[in-house]
Structure formats: structure tokens, C-alpha cells
Image (cartoon, rainbow, N blue to C red):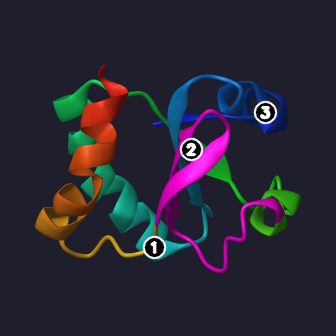
């Protein structure tokens, strides 16, 4: 997953849609969540981006991120889906399918 900085994140939020995975490199749960998300990125051919929340801490306040890992699907700069639970790949796929499918159109 490509890691982006604040400027790239702001540009992404100006696009029609995008998926951003907020994580910390010190978070073991974040590493596991990234492995769960990676196949979905390929399945839907949708770009996912990663933000190191330690490098952009104000983003946690802006997007009301209470904990990492956190995946947010943006449409027209607004969050439309936010997830914090990634321990069950089937559940994650079920929760994200509609949003990811609509990003392909």
C-alpha cells in the first residue's frame, strides 16, 4: 500500500473517491489489518493509500479517528465509511463491498 503525506492526502480528498488506511508503524494490529485489506485492493482494483498517523497527528482530529487501524472511504472529500475492525476478512469484505464496488463506476 502506498504511503502518502499531508499534501497528497489533501489532493486525494479532492478526487471523486478514495480509500485511506490510517495506521502506525508501531501498531501490530495495523500490520495485520493491512494484510486483510491488501487482497481487497487487488480484487476491486481500487487504489488504497496509507497514512502514518504519527506523521500527520492533526488528521486524527480532523477525521475523528479514535484509534488505529482505521480505514476511511472518501467520496467528494467526505468520509462515507469508517472501519476500525479488521480481524475477520469476510466481515471486512461484507462491510466494504458496496463502497468499493461503487468506486469502480
Residue 10 is drawn in which quadrant?
A: top right
- Residue 9 seen in render: yes
Give the left or right position of residue 39, taking residue 82 as reference.
left
Q: Is residue 72 magenta?
A: yes
Is the residue marked by circle 2 packed among few (<14), some (14-19), or many (20+) residues within 10 Å?
A: many
Position of the C terminus by quadrant = top left
Tell which circle, 3 or 1, labels the residue nearer the N-terminal end: 3
Disc 2: which residue: 50
Q: Residue furthest bottom?
A: 66
Q: Which residue occupies 67% across, 71% down?
A: 65
Q: State the SS at label 3.
A: helix
Q: CA distance from mark 2 to mark 1?
A: 14 Å
**In this rendering, which labeled residue sits more in front, label 2 or label 3?**
3
- Could you tell which of marks 2 and 1 lies nearer the N-terminus? 2
Residue 82, position as x, y percentages in the image: 49, 63
| Quadrant in which the N terminus appears | top left
**Nearer the observer, 18 or 34:** 18
Distance from disc 3 to disc 1, alpha carbons, whole Å, reads 22 Å
**Residue 59 among magenta residues:** no
Q: Residue at x 60, y 70 (%)?
A: 26
> Which disc, if any, is residue 57?
none
Query: Closer to the N terminus: mark 2 or mark 3?
Result: 3
Please state the horizontal and vertical placement of residue 42, each as a whole percent of the image: 23, 30
In the image, is residue 105 above or below residue 23? above
Q: Which residue is mark 1?
A: 84
Where is residue 64? Give x, y as percent: 72, 71
- Crowding around mark 1 (Cα neighbors within 10 Å: few <14, some 14 to 19, many 20+) is some
Disc 3: which residue: 10
Q: Secondary structure at mark 1?
A: loop
Amino acid at each position: 500500500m502506498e504511503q502518502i503525506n499531508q499534501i497528497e492526502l489533501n489532493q486525494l480528498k479532492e478526487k471523486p473517491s478514495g480509500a485511506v488506511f490510517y495506521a502506525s508503524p508501531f501498531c501490530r494490529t495495523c500490520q495485520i489489518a493491512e494484510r486483510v485489506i491488501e487482497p481487497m485492493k487487488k480484487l476491486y482494483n481500487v487504489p488504497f493509500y496509507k497514512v502514518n498517523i504519527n506523521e500527520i497527528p492533526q488528521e486524527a482530529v480532523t477525521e475523528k479517528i479514535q484509534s488505529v487501524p482505521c480505514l476511511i472511504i472518501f467520496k467528494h472529500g467526505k468520509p462515507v465509511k469508517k472501519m476500525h475492525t479488521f480481524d475477520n476478512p469476510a466481515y471486512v469484505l461484507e462491510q466494504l463491498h458496496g463502497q468499493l464496488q461503487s468506486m469502480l463506476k
